[in-house]
Amino acid sequence: MKSLISITDLDPGEIMRLMELTSEFEANPGQRLLEGRIVASLFFEPSTRTRLSFESAVNRLGARVIGFADTINTSVSKGETFHDTIMTISNYCDMIVMRHSLEGAPRYASEIARVPVVNAGDGSNQHPSQTLLDLYSILKTQGRLDNINIMIIGDLKYGRTVHSLLQALSHFNARFTFVAPPELELPGEYRQFLKDKGLSFIEKQHIDESIRQADIVYMTRVQRERFSDPLEYERVKNIYVLRRSAIDGAKPNMKILHPLPRVNEIDPQLDGSDHAYYFRQTENGVYTRMAIISYLLGVKK
Ligand code: CP
């Protein structure tokens, strides 16, 4: 039984196998490999894309979904513990997909559940299924994962998609440029991670002409829900807005990715640009999650 809690749970061979499976599901999404199975979708924190694309993936695979989009109508609101909730629900399903605001909650769930657990985002920590769809989007648009020049912009402190993406790309000799204000810079543990891997990276506070060398520009939202001080959020919330002028001279095949939701980080006038890939990225999420579910349940090796 294998769970997916951190992107570091997967070695490069497994990542590439999941890329192949995702491509297979994109070519043929009508594979009802999981008839009779049940997946519990437990969202203790809000979501649009992750929850609905997982549920779409489960339905496309012929399985059924149970679960909740918030805890208001569950016994959590009566005071039931996280432990008892997971112990109970793991008796009702073949897999748990869960999002939680507390870092480590999915790891704990995987230690007590009788079924595999997929981390659909835990606090500022990890978002491994997002990373796999990001990697698939990079592979599809650039034709490779190796030696990608990626500029990651915005909330590098609280952005869990950034943390898991840089860990995944560290297998593929990526060249990173990080753009963030001091308040939102990359936490020390991730800098150390890259140093330990022998990867150099550049840090900036402004989007500058080096965007012209990027294969991928990865925009992120400032994570309002993680700030303890609302005034600090107000100071940094609109710090970067990507506009057409900023990407003048970009590589013809440069693609803008964003895990979404977008608040104000990308000018909607860019949506029609050949560089904009963020909505097609969301479609890749369904095929990626079909691959993850079928791989973890062992119906695809
Ligand atoms: N990318 C992402 O996690 O989006 P949601 O919060 O809408 O699931």
Image (tube, helix red, strand yellow):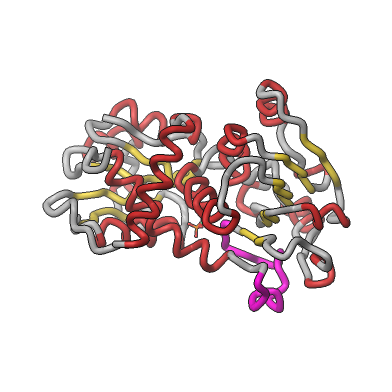
Image quadrant where one finds the N terminus:
top left
At horizontal 77% and vertical 65% (from top left) the residue drawn is 241
Region of the chain picked out in magenta, as a range: 259-274
* Magenta highlight: main SS: loop
Specify whether 265 is left or right of 17. right
Q: Residue furthest front?
A: 143
Q: Is residue 177 above or below residue 6?
A: below
Depth check: give the residue in front, 104 or 272: 272
Specify whether 256 is left or right of 116. right
In the figure, residue 56 lies in which quadrant?
Answer: bottom left
At horizontal 22% and vertical 58% (from top left) the residue drawn is 31
Residue 61 in sight here: yes
Query: Horizontal and vertical percent for residue 36?
Result: 11, 52
Query: Horizontal and vertical percent for residue 195?
Result: 72, 24
Image quadrant where one finds the C terminus:
top left
In the figure, residue 224 lies in which quadrant?
Answer: bottom right
